[in-house]
Image (cartoon, grey):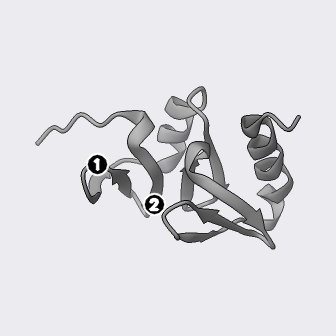
Amino acid sequence: GKKEILLDRIVYIESNLHKLNFHVLEADYVIYTLYETLNLIEKRFQEYDFVRIHQSYLVNLKYIKDIVNYNVYLVDGTNLPVAKPRYKHVRECFAIFKGEI
C-alpha cells in the first residue's frame, strides 16, 4: 500500500540489504518498510537535513541530541553507531544544523 509521511517526522532510516525501515514519530513511534536502497533515499533527502552516519543509517539532524565517541544519541533515547570515516562529516553537519558554525 501507500503511505504519505512528512519528512519532518522521520527520525531515521535503517537499511538491511534492500529493505528500509523508516522510524517515524507520529502519535506513537511507528516503523514503515520500503524496498529500496539507502543510497537512492540519501540522494533524494540530501537537501532536507538528513545525514548518512553509517552504511546502514540515514538520520534526521533534527532528532540528534548529541554525538559522542562514534555514537549518535537521538532525542528518543536511541543510540546509533557512526562509521569512523564519516564521523568528522557528521559532527560538522550537526554543528552547522545547530547554528554553531
Cα separation between marks 1 and 2: 20 Å
Report the amino acid beneath label 2. Ser
Given the image, on which type of amino acid does mark 1 rest?
Glu
What residue do we see at 56% from left, 30% from top? 48
Q: Measuring from the top left, give residue 71's x and y in whole percent.
A: 70, 70
Dot 1 alpha-carbon crowd within 10 angstroms: few under 14, some 14 to 19, many 20 or more? few
Could you say where residue 96 lies in the image, as x and y percent from the top left? 79, 36
- Residue at 46% x, 54% y is 13
Q: Residue at 52% x, 70% y: name it.
A: 78
Residue 59 location, x and y as percent? 56, 51
Q: Position of residue 79 (x, y in %)?
A: 58, 72
Q: Are marks 1 and 2 in contact (CB under 8 Å)?
A: no
The residue to which callout 1 is attached is 26
Identify the image quadrant of residue 31.
bottom left
- Which image quarter is the C terminus in? top right
Task: Between label 1 and label 2, give the one nearer the viewer.
Answer: 1
Is 75 positioned to the left or the right of 97 in the image? left
The kind of secondary structure element at disc 2 is: strand
Comes first in the chain, label 1 or label 2: 2
Element carrying mark 1: loop
Q: Is residue 58 left or right of residue 8?
A: right
Q: Which quadrant would the N terminus be assigned to in this image?
A: top left
For label 2, the residue is 15
